[in-house]
Every structure is written in structure tokens, then in C-alpha cells.
């Protein structure tokens, strides 16, 4: 499962309910995707195609 946390324009923020890593969120839109750690600080883990402005 991947419950949606938030939607803004064409961005979807979600997580996978069975992942056991530290708290994080995935972001996806038609152009690309990214993953951010939420704790202990917000940090970009990886990004595919998103430019600096989108991040």
C-alpha cells in the first residue's frame, strides 16, 4: 500500500506502509520522483528528473 499524505497541483506525496526505514516521504508527478527523509531533519535522499526548482 502507498497511502497519499498530500496532493498539490500534480505532485503526490505518499509513503509505502511496509517499508521499515526511518520516516520518509516519496513525491511523484508525471515528470519525475523524489524521496525525502523526514527525521531527524528533512533531507533529499534521491531524485529522478526533478530540477532544483521542483525540489
Image (tube, grey):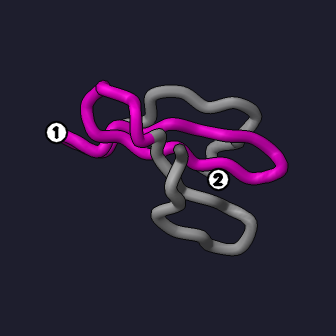
The residue located at (74%, 66%) in the rendering is: 10
- Is 33 situated left or right of 46 in this image? right
- Relative to 52, residue 7 above or below: below
Q: Which mark is residue 53?
A: 2
User: Picture coordinates of residue 40 (x, y %)?
Assistant: 16, 39
Q: Which of marks 2 and 1 is in front?
A: 1
**Image quarter of residue 9:** bottom right
Q: Give the tally of numbered discs.
A: 2
* Mark 2 closeness class: few <14, some 14–19, many ≥20 residues within 10 Å: few
Pick out the residue farthest to the bottom.
9
Sequence-wise, the earlier of marks 2 and 1 is 1
- Is 18 situated left or right of 35 in this image? left
Chain part drawn in magenta? 17-42
The residue located at (28%, 39%) in the rendering is: 23
**Tag 1 residue:** 40
User: Picture coordinates of residue 44 (x, y %)?
Assistant: 44, 35
Amino acid at each position: 500500500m502507498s497511502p497519499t499524505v498530500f496532493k498539490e497541483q500534480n505532485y503526490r506525496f505518499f509513503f509505502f506502509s511496509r517499508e521499515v526505514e526511518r520516516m520518509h516521504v516519496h513525491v511523484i508527478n508525471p515528470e519525475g520522483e523524489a524521496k525525502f527523509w523526514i527525521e531527524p531533519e528533512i533531507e533529499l535522499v534521491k531524485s529522478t528528473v526533478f530540477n532544483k526548482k521542483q525540489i
